[in-house]
Amino acid sequence: MGIELKKIAHVIDEQYAAETAMLREIKAGSYTLDAPYVKLNPYLIAPLTALVCFTTPEETEAKVVVKGKEAEGDIGFSFPRAKEHLLPIYGLYAETDNTVEITLGTGAVKTLSIRTEKAPDSVHLPTGVKCVPGYLGGKVVFLSPTSPASTAAYDYRGDVRWYGTLNFAFDLKRVKNGRLLIGTNRLLLPPYNVTGLFEMGMIGKIYKEFRLFGGYHHDQFEMEDGNLLILTQDPSQGTVEDMCVLVDRGTGQILKSWDYKKVLPQYPTGGSGSQDAHDWFHNNAVWYDKKTHSLTFSGRHQDIIINIGYDDHELKWIIGDPDNWPQEMVDKYFFKPVGDLSRFDWQYEQHACLVLPDGDVMCFDNGHWRAKRKENYVKARDNFSRGVRYRIDTEKMEIEQIWQYGKERGAEFFSSYICNVEYYGEGHYLVHSGGIGYMNGEACELPPVAYQDEGVRFNSITVEVKDDQVMYELEIPANYYRAEKLDLYCPEDALTFGKGELLGSLGVTEEFTTVPDLPAGGAVPEKYALKMAQESDRLVIKALFEKGQMVMLLLEGKTTHAYFVPTTKRPYLAMCVGTFLENDERAVELPISFENISGDYKISLIIDEYKYDTGVEISI
Amino acid sequence: MLKEITQTEYETLDITAPTLVEFYSKTCGPCKMLGFVLKEIEKSLPDFPMYQIDFDANAELKERLGVKGFPTILLYKGGAEVERLEGLKQKPVVQKAIESLF
């Protein structure tokens, strides 16, 4: 059987085609309040959204209310005066004849019924919700998955009011223009680094993809001028998750970078229980603090939160257990605990650091291993995770723990990876323990997604605490990277038409300069299950190879481009997102960027002693 | 000159002269590819001594030399190790390391 080169359109192209068709329909019709145009899931990836269009003879306001299962579940929004009304509908329930009420400024009312389809099984339903009805107002809690699940938003009852059908990665954040930033669904570097970030409207329209040569992982932060801090790495340096870049919001170009190797000693210095030489820091969060004009980063694999000058790139301070660090660093950068030391705990393998308006620092203290020396490591069953707030005095280099939530819940709240905290005001926090897992009834020692075992039981507990009272608690049987409480409707998130943009660059995939001269082996044997897909900006090959096989991909045309295909996987000690994992451990995936390549090529594969012909030709 | 040797033969090497020693494994794709890189280099430097040692079959030696993984290239001069390259390297990188020995 021949090997096929599958052509995969970018979601931006698919959405543009759908939008063009939709606008043609709208233009061809004559839609009124009584007989409006209704398009469910207009941008193909958000099935609980719709667009309602109609015209009115005079300019008038329009108010939309998606009726809830009870009054507190209503979700509504008022749109400004217009004659041509384009009303996004958010907050529909799945597999429901939804009632949507539209009221004009003139007093005219139209009640629509919008039928939605059943959500896929990957949209997990809660196993527990505790909340005072109406407490969240019109807000919902977005969860982005790390175990097999979909990104979805849950209301105060735990009902799903939004979900996405793309395999989005990492945190979802709302930026000043009302849109959402989230990792793309395009894998770049296994196991979870993706090509970059999507900027997406709540309706599901992707306005921009910011692509990065080193890919995107974990976290991003919008600066005051709109430019983006994005966590990445430089693949040519042989290490990962140790670099942050500032990306121009308009062009996607990298303006500035911070390389932590320049300010920190690496493996094995300060190593947490999960550190290796390749992933020595494991940066999982970035925060910019305007008051101090500095950047704060969380490094899971050194159990530290560090602060670096934005302009001078110099290390200012380190929050973390100083045990096992060089004394000269302890003296210069680490804090000394003060206050009630009986309540003080350091954080270990933490996530989601943030700097509060008063300079306090919060994070999710996963507590994984909870010690700096192997002989003192704490078993998961005896451990805890928590949200914690520290007050730091950078003059005296003193630190005081002033709040925590989670220690008292013990192992049932323990997440060895991922998770976040949010600050909503004094005494008002969100603590999301999204990486809970059990094997044979016991808390997992490693991230549950790393086991790839059907016996793993996933769990996620998201808690909102106000003045030490739990106001909302959501429990779902899956793992979720972070939780974000958001309004579905946002005045700034206005739908605009036109094709989305692919910004930045995937860079040039490193070629291998030595090409072995080997005998022809004929067609590629079927056992390798070779698949190839051509996207607008890259070629992706997937195959099954045994560990240790020598594999090289050749593009042979007027010039030859050769790429080494790694078949030996590193042990992943931090499987932060498991949604890209294949079930077969032989699975290999290699993307090849089209940057600096053009022309017609024949695709061949070198596998061990032979050169095989795929029979596939590609035009780039 | 590219030759496979054992620990016993390693002990007899004259590493006062510029020498390259590569630890490899038969179960390692990058090692196989690095083997082709070394063969390429051998064409232009036929007299330069390059030796390959099986990582798995020479455990005591790799422990003693602190070789943690494969492929690993050790470069010797004046009786001592002067540079170490870990992982698969491209031909220009290996060539540059060899040139620095002279």
Image (tube, rainbow, N blue to C red):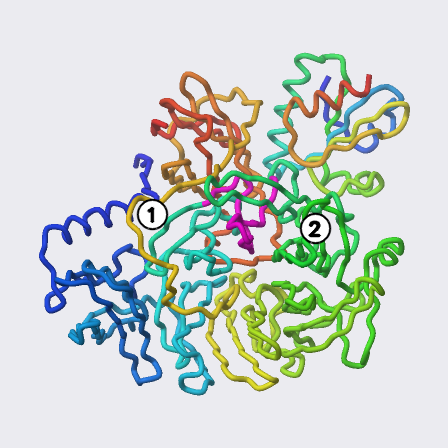
Where is residue A379 shown, x and y percent of the image? 70, 72
Q: Residues within 10 Å of mark 2 (few under 14, many from 20)?
A: many
- Label 1 or label 2, whichever lies nearer to me, is 1
Tag 2 or tag 1, which sits nearer the N-term? 1
The kind of residue on which mark 2 rests is Trp
Name the image quarter holding residue A30. Answer: bottom left
For disc 2, the chain is A
Horizontally, residue A398 falls left or right of residue A528, namely right
* Residue A215 forms part of the magenta stretch: yes
Residue A388's place in the image compared with A562, above or below, is: below
Q: Which residues are magenta?
A: A210-234
Viewer-nearest residue: B19 or A1: B19
Where is residue A460 shown, x and y percent of the image? 51, 73
Residue A280 is marked as 2
Residue A356 is marked as none
In three-dimensional space, the C-alpha distance between marks 1 and 2, rounded to whole angstroms, equals 34 Å
Residue A11 is marked as 1
Give the prevailing secondary structure in the magenta stretch.
Answer: strand
